[in-house]
């Protein structure tokens, strides 16, 4: 299971939009990437301090991407391969099958890319996310 789209190694999946909302997909085809917001529906607990998958130190949950958050909402930027009516074919997926989707937004570099950003504790281990997949639960 990939832990982030950036390390998902081309994992493909589909996003199915209910027919009643399908008209809202108009014009999405022109975007190479989309932002998916979804419910981490398999989460059964909330933690305020977690040890992330690739770390050994406890971190405040809001300084991590751990699913075990008070409002278990996930955010993944995935590549949009193509659309077939109400089904989006996407790549670089770190989302479980059957996950309930909350929203779709286009990824727009001029809005969403921050070249001057810092990555907090993740900068202590710069190669942290490269090609890594989860092999354990959060503790
Ligand atoms: C570290 S989270 C990052 C998710 C997202 N990219 C984010 O930043 O919000 C990715 C992990 O969430 C877990 N996950 C994915 N879908 C889930 C779901 N529906 N319920 C619970 N856990 C899920 C999987 O273990 C996956 O490896």
Image (cartoon, rainbow, N blue to C red):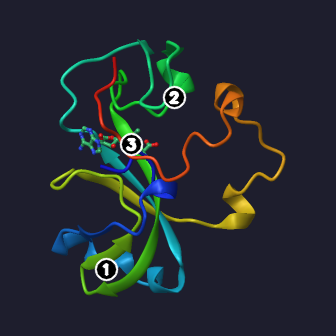
Q: Nearer the viewer, mark 3 or mark 2?
A: 2
Q: Secondary structure at mark 1?
A: helix
Circles 1 and 2: CB atoms closer than 8 Å: no
Rounded to the nearest whole Å, what is the CA distance between mark 3 and mark 1?
Answer: 24 Å
Residue 133 — which label?
Answer: none
Q: Is ligand 1 within 8 Å of the beta carbon of the residue shown at mark 2?
A: yes
Is 15 placed left or right of 134 in the picture? left
Residue drawn at (45%, 49%) of the image = 4
Residue drawn at (30%, 52%) of the image = 95
Q: Nearer the viewer, mark 3 or mark 1?
A: 3
N-term mark: 1 or 2? 1
Q: Nearer the viewer, residue 58 or 130?
A: 130
Mark 2 residue crowding within 10 angstroms, few (<14) / some (14–19) / many (20+) = some
Residue 64 — which label?
Answer: 2
- Quadrant of the frame with the C terminus: top left
Q: Is ligand 1 within 8 Å of the beta carbon of the residue shown at mark 3?
A: yes
Q: Nearer the viewer, mark 1 or mark 2?
A: 2
The residue beneath circle 3 is 74
17 up-or-down from 136: above or below: below
Residue 23 — which label?
Answer: 1
Residue drawn at (37%, 24%) of the image = 69
Q: Quadrant of ligand 1?
A: top left
Q: Secondary structure at mark 3?
A: strand
N-term mark: 3 or 2? 2
Q: Position of residue 94 (x, y in %)?
A: 35, 53
């Amino acid at each position: 299971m990939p832990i982030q789209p950036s390390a998902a190694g081309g994992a493909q999946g589909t996003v199915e939009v209910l027919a009643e909302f399908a008209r809202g997909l108009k014009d999405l085809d022109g975007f190479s990437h989309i932002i998916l917001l979804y419910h981490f529906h398999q989460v059964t607990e909330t933690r305020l301090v977690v040890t992330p998958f690739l770390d050994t130190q406890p971190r405040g949950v809001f300084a991590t991407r751990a699913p075990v958050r008070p409002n278990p909402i996930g955010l993944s930027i995935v590549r949009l391969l193509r659309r077939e009516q109400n089904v989006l074919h996407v790549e670089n997926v770190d989302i479980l099958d059957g996950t309930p989707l909350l929203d779709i937004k286009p990824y727009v570099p001029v809005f969403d890319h921050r070249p001057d950003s810092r990555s907090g504790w993740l900068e202590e281990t710069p190669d942290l996310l490269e090609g890594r997949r989860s092999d354990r639960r959060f503790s």
